[in-house]
Image (spheres, rainbow, N blue to C red):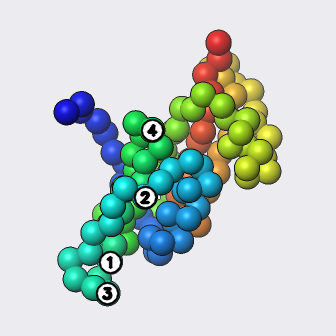
């Protein structure tokens, strides 16, 4: 098994969050609830990148920032109707998910 870091993002509605993250190319891997009706804990993945989305109070703070490095920021920018900005290290955009978590998404300079 490869070691990895998986950020946990607080969400109010995991199903709605999964739909939003699907627009970024993520797909749901699994969902866990201790019992029906209790908060959900979900993994979404895009290639080798995973995020945990948690409805559990206290798992993460609102307004978290995650940086996602991708090969084509332009495709994601077009999906969300924004323009990438140039930085010395590459081109990037910043989005907020429905729960206010920030995702800075960039393609490195060549």
Residue sitting at the far bottom: 37
In the rendered image, which quarter contains the N terminus? top left
Image vertical order of residue 64 relative to residue 57, above or below:
above
Q: At 56% from the left edge and 48% from the top edge, which residue is drawn?
A: 25
User: Which numbered disc covers residue 37?
Assistant: 3
Give the residue at mark 4: 47
CA distance for labels 4 and 2: 12 Å
User: Which numbered disc covers residue 28?
Assistant: 2
CA distance for labels 3 and 2: 19 Å
Q: Nearer the viewer, mark 3 or mark 2?
A: 2
CA distance for labels 1 and 4: 26 Å
Q: Nearer the viewer, residue 18 or 69?
A: 18
The tag earlier along the polypeptide, 3 or 4, is 3
Q: Nearer the viewer, mark 3 or mark 4?
A: 4
The tag earlier along the polypeptide, 1 or 2, is 2
Circles 1 and 4, Cβ within 8 Å, touching? The answer is no
In the rendered image, which quarter contains the C terminus? top right
User: Which numbered disc covers residue 39?
Assistant: 1
In the rendered image, which quarter is residue 104 located in? top right
């Amino acid at each position: 098994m490869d070691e990895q870091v998986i950020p946990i993002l607080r969400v109010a509605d995991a199903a709605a969050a999964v739909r939003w993250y699907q627009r970024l190319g993520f797909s749901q891997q699994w969902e866990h609830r201790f019992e029906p009706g209790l908060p959900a804990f979900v993994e979404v993945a895009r290639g080798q990148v995973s995020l945990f989305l948690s409805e559990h109070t206290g798992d993460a703070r609102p307004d978290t920032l995650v940086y996602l490095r991708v090969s084509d920021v332009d495709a994601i920018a077009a999906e969300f109707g924004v323009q990438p900005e140039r930085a010395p290290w590459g081109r990037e955009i910043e989005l907020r998910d429905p729960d206010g978590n920030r995702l800075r998404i960039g393609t490195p300079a060549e």
